[in-house]
Amino acid sequence: MPNEIKCEITAHLATLSTNPRTSWTKELNLVSWNGKEPKYDLREWSPDHSKMGKVVTLSEEELTALRDAINDLEEK
């Protein structure tokens, strides 16, 4: 298919939670879309990773800014 989207998890970084009802997991991964440079990807995945939920993708700079914001919250 010409419009096929290819997704490859290049690194699993963390599982943040698991939905006990569906067994879907909220994960932080490095994901390459259509062979491009991997980005940090925060989304829910089905147990076999064949289905996925909505996403937030972050560049390394955005992830660093998010980390700094979370650290600032902890200091308050």
Image (tube, rainbow, N blue to C red):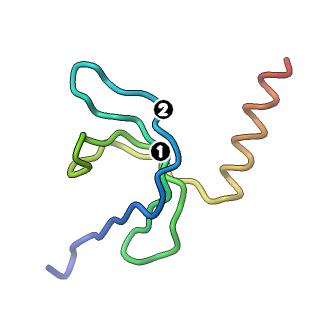
Mark closer to the chain start, 1 or 2:
2
> Residue 60 appears at what percent x and percent y?
66, 59
> Residue 26 appears at what percent x and percent y?
40, 35
Task: Give the answer, above or below, for where 67 lies relative to 1.
Answer: above
Q: Is residue 4 left or right of residue 75?
A: left
Kind of element beneath mark 1: strand
Task: Residue 22: give its label.
Answer: none
- The picture quadrant where one finds residue 18 is top left
Residue receiving disc 2:
16
Q: Is residue 28 left or right of residue 21?
A: right
Q: Assign the C terminus to one quadrant of the image.
A: top right
Look at label 1 and name its amino acid.
Leu
Kind of element beneath mark 2: strand
Task: Give the answer, above or below, for where 10 lies relative to 45.
Answer: below
State yes or no: discs 1 and 2 in contact (Cβ < 8 Å). Answer: yes
Q: Residue at x 73, y 31 (%)?
A: 70
**3D distance between C-alphas at marks 1 and 2:** 9 Å
- The picture quadrant where one finds residue 67 is top right
- The picture quadrant where one finds residue 3 is bottom left
Q: Residue at x 71, y 57 (%)?
A: 61
Q: Is residue 2 left or right of residue 61?
A: left
Look at label 2 and name its amino acid.
Leu
Q: Label 1 crowding class (10 Å Cα cut-off): few <14, some 14-19, many 20+? A: many
Task: Residue 42: give its label.
Answer: 1
Task: Give the answer, above or below, for where 1 lies relative to 24.
Answer: below
